[in-house]
Image (cartoon, helix red, strand yellow):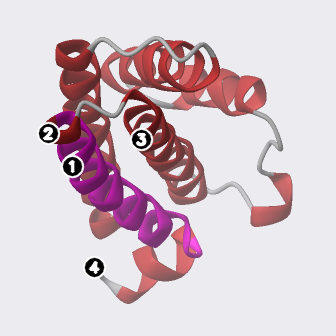
């Protein structure tokens, strides 16, 4: 990643990459053990990756760190305005499946969570590409 992109994302992208990496490993371990609580924790890490990548994306779009929204709804509104349809769709899917269903409600559907963690990883990858171009 170029210096400017790294500076502009201010650690959000690094945290997103770390979170999605941990989420994938922890989910695979949880799935083998059939541990739904661990799966819900892994799902929340994948959601964290999307949330952090959203902030990294907004930083790339010129938003100052102190102007980033504190909550997910504000982040979503800015993403909807400045992001692509694909990013918006993945954000909504990750929030609904990983954050709300798996983490808060404890509803673990193994194939769905695995798929959405993959989508979350793609989200982080797309944002990383944006950061590298900046």
- Mark before the other along the chain sequence, 2 or 3: 2
> Relative to residue 70, is residue 56 depicted above or below?
below
**Farthest bottom residue?**
3
Residue found 64% across the figure and 21% down from its top: 104
Structural distance between the alpha carbons of marks 4 and 3: 32 Å
Residue placed under numbered mark 3 in the picture: 38
* Mark 1 surroundings within 10 Å by alpha-carbon count, few (fewer than 14), some (14 through 19), many (20 or more): some
Left or right: residue 51 compared with residue 108: right
> In the rendered view of the protein, which quadrant contains the N terminus?
bottom left
- Mark before the other along the chain sequence, 4 or 3: 4
Structural distance between the alpha carbons of marks 1 and 2: 5 Å
Structural distance between the alpha carbons of marks 1 and 4: 30 Å
- Mark before the other along the chain sequence, 2 or 4: 4
Residue interval drawn in magenta: 10-31
- Mark before the other along the chain sequence, 1 or 4: 4
Q: Is residue 130 visible?
A: no
Q: Disc 1 vs disc 3: Cβ atoms closer than 8 Å?
A: yes
Q: Main secondary structure of the magenta part?
A: helix
Residue placed under numbered mark 4 in the picture: 1
Circle nearer the viewer, 4 or 3: 3
SS for dot 3:
helix
Residue placed under numbered mark 2 in the picture: 32
């Amino acid at each position: 990643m170029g210096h400017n992109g790294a500076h502009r994302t201010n650690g959000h992208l690094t945290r997103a990459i770390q979170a999605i990496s941990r989420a994938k490993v922890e989910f695979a371990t949880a799935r083998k053990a059939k541990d739904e609580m661990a799966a819900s924790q892994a799902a929340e890490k994948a959601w964290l990756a999307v949330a952090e990548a959203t902030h990294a994306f907004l930083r790339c779009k010129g938003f100052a760190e102190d102007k980033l929204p504190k909550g997910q709804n504000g982040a979503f509104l800015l993403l909807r305005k400045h992001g692509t349809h694909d990013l918006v769709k993945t954000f909504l899917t990750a929030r609904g499946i990983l954050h709300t269903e798996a983490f808060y409600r404890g509803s673990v559907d193994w194939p769905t969570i695995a798929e959405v963690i993959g989508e979350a990883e793609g989200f982080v990858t797309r944002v990383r590409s944006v950061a590298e171009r900046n």
